[in-house]
Image (tube, rainbow, N blue to C red):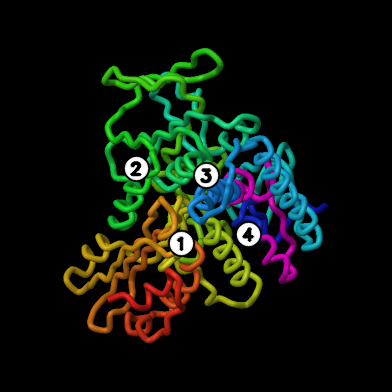
Amino acid sequence: MSNHFDVIAIGAGSGGLSIAERAAAYGAKTAVIEAGELGGTCVNVGCVPKKVMWYGASVAHALHDGQDYGFDVKIGALNWEKLVTKRENFIGGIIDWYHDYLIESKVDVIEGFAKFIDNKTLDVDGERYTADHIVISTGGRPIIPTDIDGAEHGLTSDGFFEDLDEVQPQKVVVVGGGYIALEFAMLMNGLGSDVSVLHQGWPVLEGFDSTIQTALRKQMESDGITLNDDGIISKIEKIADNNLTIHFKDGSQIDNVNALIWAIGRIPNTDNIGLENTNVELDPRGMVIVDDEEKTTVDGIYALGDIIGKAPLTPVAIAAGRRLGDRLYGGKPERKMSYDNIATVMFTHPPIGTIGMSEEKAHDEYGDKIKIYQTSFVPLYHQMTRNKVKTVMKLIVLGEEEKIIGCHIMGLGADEMLQGFAVAIRMGATKQDFDDTIAIHPVSAEELVTMK
């Protein structure tokens, strides 16, 4: 194998695989360098295994709801090991598919850790490689605090999928208030664990619309999740049977914790790939500085995905990688990635779908030029259940034409319904366009086109 390529992607996650595959489809000689499993965080310890566990928790909720619908449902214990085994077998199938697909796509896979020697050269375990274009797509990693004694006894989101393979933790503490923390908290609660969330003072889901923040907090409290806004951890102590005691600075503690999950943020994997040997510039967070074409400060080096600090989402990395391939080798210089109006879903119970501005951000930018439409209701499904899980919807519109600049949904089916509405909003839909759309009845989504 020649050691010179047209394109080398560092990291075989969503972004790296996408640029390599797209460039190869145009006839470029491409390679990806990866020290771990193909697929990166999303496939191995992120989106995919999380969604499997979310479905498991959804089934648990449905079993309880079945009783309210008149079914004689006998709810037994969850076979945690069976669920985890099926999840891992499914992921293994995806990884096997990647290997076959990359061979078919004529993308070389170089196993090992990549490190820059200079602006054009990479070292992988003693072997050197060069490329006309190098794409940094190394992703990020979860943070473990360094100032708390015993913090190493906790798990990260990676460890949740790698280490909890045999026995379900019955008492779980999640530290963090972002979407990863709350997804874990609510799926474990749904699967029957006793869950506490520690998020130390700031609102849950910082940056999300306040209506969603409030509604989700109420739902978590209704589900029996303990929320601790003020507890500051001073020490983590491992006790008998590998359980933990969490000590707080005020002298209180939580005993007999089976699993502590740190979900306090992620940092970019840019500190160990030899960027000091290049002229690539980083911002104070360690994110790679890029322009609107994912170009770094070095000609021929690009970066995409979680390490550029724009929108750390799998579909964003995929789209950016494919567009980069289109520009470099497809003769499509206009194919740039837009980071505006990106729809995203948080897999809590119920799920949250959001696109565009929050009310707070829209008000800061446009003042009294915005108008809010919102509704809250118990959907038909939950009219029949003892758990009256609400659906909350909000539209934020701008100016006299009432262009929709924000749409936020929390409720049953929000994860699926947002995709179609996102297309309309990206195309510049107005409130009148929504009003003129005939509703589908009876579904929750009809509320978005009948809202007053």
Task: Return the residue at label 2.
Answer: 221
Q: Is residue 19 left or right of residue 169?
A: right
**Eyeballing the image, is 51 above or below 322?**
above
Question: Which is in the foreground here, disc 2 or disc 1?
Answer: 1
Q: Could you tell me if residue 90 is visible in this image?
A: yes
**Towards the viewer: 218 or 397:** 218
Q: Nearer the viewer, mark 4 or mark 3?
A: 3
Where does residue 10 sit, x and y in percent of width and height? 63, 50
Query: Which residue ends up furthest to the top in the rendered image?
Result: 240
Looking at the rendered structure, the kind of residue marked 3 is: Gly
- Comes first in the chain, label 3 or label 1: 3
User: What residue would you read off at disc 1?
Assistant: 381
Q: CA distance from mark 4 to mark 3?
A: 22 Å
Magenta stretch containing residue 28, yes or no?
yes
Residue stretch in magenta: 20-49
Q: Earlier in the sequence, mark 3 or mark 2?
A: 3
* Circle on res. 140: 3
Q: CA distance from mark 2 to mark 4?
A: 51 Å
Query: Label 2 vs label 1: CA separation?
Result: 21 Å
